[in-house]
Image: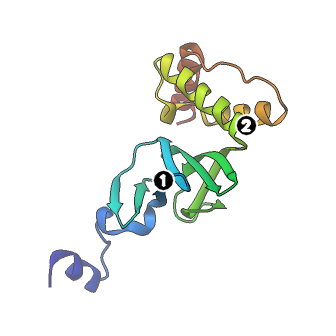
Amino acid sequence: MNGDAASRARGGPMPMAARADNLTQVELTWVEKRIENWIRFGRETREQVLDRRRVFFYRPGAVFAFVRWAANDFGTILSRIDIVRAITPGEPYQTLPFVRPGGEILLKIEGWPKVEQVLRHIDAVEAAGVDPCEVCPDHWRHVHHRLTAGQEPRAYTSERHEAWLKRRRVEG
């Protein structure tokens, strides 16, 4: 009996690496000109390669952008970007296709023109020297609401980011 099995047999905790149920899984598929699911940003803990699919695993609290695009013989049938925070087991969450168990959806935008706006906004965040994974979750909600209302979102500046980091330290 190996160490992991012995630990489980004694009723002890499983090592973190063995407890995949604590991780959020995102299934990515790529079928040229038909289905393209990809991660725009995010820090996966590990990756599992299947056939035409890959699965990325994210720790609780990790933020990632998941882009889905699909087409048929007549053109695009789905364009969507979701910015999601991986949840801790027991925490409430929203379900999302290809994301298990689900997550806290910070931004949900559909339609290629608006998806492109979000991608450009992410590029601008990176150009400001900020990792999109570290952006204040409220900012992604702001971007969602502004684009949904047909308005331009405010830029996420290094000053806004510093304010977020200070707020996070104070809140603990």
Residue 152 percent location from the top left of the image: 76, 23
Q: Is residue 136 left or right of residue 60?
A: right
Tags 2 and 1 touching, CB below 8 Å:
no
Horizontal and vertical percent position of residue 52: 40, 63
Vertical placement of 146 versus 37: above or below?
A: above
Q: How many labels were placed on the picture?
A: 2
State the residue in front, 37 or 24.
37
Distance CA(mark 2)–CA(mark 1):
29 Å
Q: Residues within 10 Å of mark 2 (few under 14, many from 20)?
A: many
Could you tell me if residue 92 is visible in this image? no
Task: Tell me residue 140's x, y (percent).
Answer: 65, 35
Indicate the quadrant where residue 124 lies.
Answer: top right
Residue marked by disc 1: 32
Question: Which residue: 52% across, 58% down?
Answer: 88
Q: Which mark is residue 144?
A: 2
Q: Residue at x 35, y 52 (%)?
A: 45
Nearest the viewer among 22 and 98 is: 98
User: Which residue type carries mark 1?
Assistant: Glu
Q: Under tag 1, what secondary structure?
A: loop
Task: Give above or below for 110 relative to 125.
Answer: below
Query: Residue 3 at x, y = what percent?
Result: 16, 75
Under mark 2, the amino acid is His
